[in-house]
Amino acid sequence: MKFLTSLHILVLAFIISHDVKAKNQIVADLSQENVKITTDFLGAKILLFGAYDGQKGDDIIVVVTGPKGLVTVQKKEKVFGIWVNTKSVNYINTPKYLNISSNRDINKILNQKTQKISEIGLNNLKIRLQPGKKVQKEKEWREALTRNMLKSKLWSLNENSVSLNKNALFRSYLSLPSNVITGQFEVKILHYRNSKLISKELSTINVSKSGVSAEIYNIAQNYSTLYGIFAVILAVLVGWGTNLIFRKV
Amino acid sequence: MYIYLPIAEQPIHSLAILGVGTFLGLIMGLVGVGGGFLLTPIMMFLGIPPPVAVASVANQLVAPSVSGVLSHWKRGNVDFKMGTVLLLGGVVGSSIGVVIFNFLGKIGQLDLVIKSSYVVFLTLIGSLMLSESLNLILRKRKGKVSRGKLHQHNWLHGLPFKTRFRKSKLYISVLLPIFIGIIVGILAALMGIGGGFIIVPAMIYLLGMPTSLVVGTSLFQIIFVAANTTILQASQNQTVDIVLASILLLGSVVGVQVGSRFTNILKGEYLRLILSTLIILVSLKLLTDLITIPSDIFSVIISR
C-alpha cells in the first residue's frame, strides 16, 4: 500500500515537474496534512514530496516548525546527597517541534552567515530568554535546551535525508514522535542554487487530538470536577460489579 | 496493544498495565495491603509522569476498596462509626494534600517530594514487615507463637471529646481518629496511596481497635479519601488519567478476588516476607534514581 502510494506520487510529481520547469518554481505536497492523535497514536511518519526546476548541484532544505511557546530548562544540583532541581531558565518563542532536513550537509550548502540570517540550523533560531531574569553562562543553558529537545525527538536535524531525483523531484520523510504537541506546523521547502534561494514553497500540517482521546482530554480540561466525579462513580461501579460477579462464582 | 493515554499524553502497552494491576490486586487480596504504595512507583518506572501516576492510582484504588468493604461488611467486620470519624479527618487531610501537591508542582519540586516520600515510607514499611515476618517464621519453627498484646492505655486516651465506639468496644477521644485521618489523608493525596499501611497499624496500636475490624474499617475510609483525592486532583490539577485508571482497576479488582481466595492456602508470614522484599527493592530503585548522577543534569519542561 505504502509502495503504491509512493509510486503514484512519483508519477504525479513527474507530470507536475514539466509544468514546474517552465516557471522556475517549486511545488510540494504532503502525504498527510492532518495528523490526528487518536487512542492508537504511536507517532506519525509523513512523506513530503514535490518537483522543482533544478540543475545539477542544486540543494533542497526543508524546515518544519511546530507551535512556539515557553520551554523551561531545569538544572539539578546535589543537595544533601540527592539530585534536586535547583535552578531554572525560561525560554520564550521556542519551537516545540523542529525538523531540519537537507540533501547534504547544510554547511556545504550555505555559509554560517546566511544560515544565521535565514534562521536555518539548531543554533540560529530566534529563541529568547524570558525578560527580567539575568542568566549566567547562558550558553550552557541554551546548549542544554538543544540537547534535551534532540533527545526527546521533538527536534531533529537530518542532513542527507532529502533525496533528489533527476534534478526535478525531491522527497523526504518527517517523523512526528508520539509525544508531539498539537497545533499548526509550518513546512518550508527551500530550493538553493550556489547558496542562493531560487524558490520556496510553504505548507502546513495540522496536528490535533481526535476521537475518544480528544473527548476525554477536553472533558478533563473543561469540566474537570464533573470528570473527577465520573471517574469515581466508574470505579465504584466496577468495584461493586466485581463483588456481585464473584459472589455468584 | 498500545493505547494512547489522553492525560499522560503518551502511548503505553495496555497489557503491561493490565498485568501490573492484576499482580498488585493479587497481593492486595492475599496480604490485605499493598495496592497504592507499590502501584504508584511502578507506574513511574514505566514512564508515567509522577503527578499523573499519583492521581490516577488514587482513582483506581476506589474500586478494590469498594469491593473489599462489601465483603467485609457481609461478615460484619466494619465499624462504620469509627470509619466515618476517620474519613472526616481523611477528607480534610486529602484536601490539604492536593493543595500542597499543586504548590509543589508550581515550584517544580513535585517529582522530588513524591519520590523521596516513597523512599522513606517504603524503606520503613518494608523493613518493619521484613523483621516481623522473619520473627514470626523463626518463632513458629521453635514452636512458640505468642499472642499480641491487647491495647494499652496511654496519654492519648486522656484527650477530650470522648466518644463510645460500640462496635470496636472503645471509649476514646474523637480527636485521635480525626488526627490519624488527616495525616493519612495528606499522604494519600501526595503519594497516590490509600494509606492502608499507615492506618492499619495506627488503628491497632494507637486506637487499640480489634484486629478483625481493622481491614474492613480502613477500606471503608479509603474509599472516601481516594474518591475525594480523585475529584480534587481532577479539578485542581487535571492529572487523573481515566484510561490508565480504568485498565488498572479492571486488573486489580479481578486480582483482589482471586488473591483473597488463596489466603488460606498460602502462609501469611511467607507472603509478607516476599512482599517486604519487593517493597525494599522498589525503594532501593527509587533511592538510586535520586542519588546517582543523572545522565544530564539539565532537563526541559515543555508547557502545553
Image (spheres, rainbow, N blue to C red):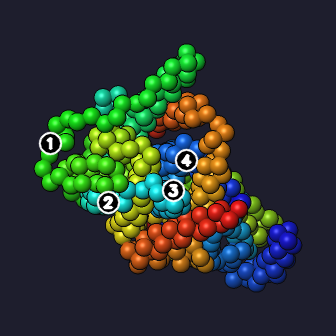
Q: Do discs 3 and 4 share a chain?
A: yes
Quadrant where the C terminus of chain B is found in the figure: bottom left
Query: Quick one: SS at disc 3?
Result: loop
Q: Looking at the image, is mark 2 or mark 4 earlier in the sequence?
A: 4
Left or right: where B4 falls relative to B92? right
Q: Residue at x 35, y 28 (%)?
A: A81
Left or right: where B299 falls relative to B274? left
Q: Residue at x 14, y 42 (%)?
A: B158
Query: For mark 2, what is the residue?
Result: B81
Q: Residues within 10 Å of mark 3 (few under 14, many from 20)?
A: few
Q: Position of residue B181 (x, y in %)?
A: 29, 52
Q: Do discs 2 and 3 share a chain?
A: yes
Q: Position of residue B204 (x, y in %)?
A: 36, 40
Q: Chain of mark 2?
A: B
Say which amino acid is labelled 4: Met
> Which numbered circle lies on residue B75?
3
Q: Chain of mark 1?
A: B
Q: Residue at x 55, y 15 (%)?
A: B142
Q: Looking at the image, is mark 2 or mark 3 earlier in the sequence?
A: 3
Q: Looking at the image, is mark 1 or mark 2 earlier in the sequence?
A: 2
Say which amino acid is labelled 1: Gly
Q: Do discs 2 and 4 share a chain?
A: yes
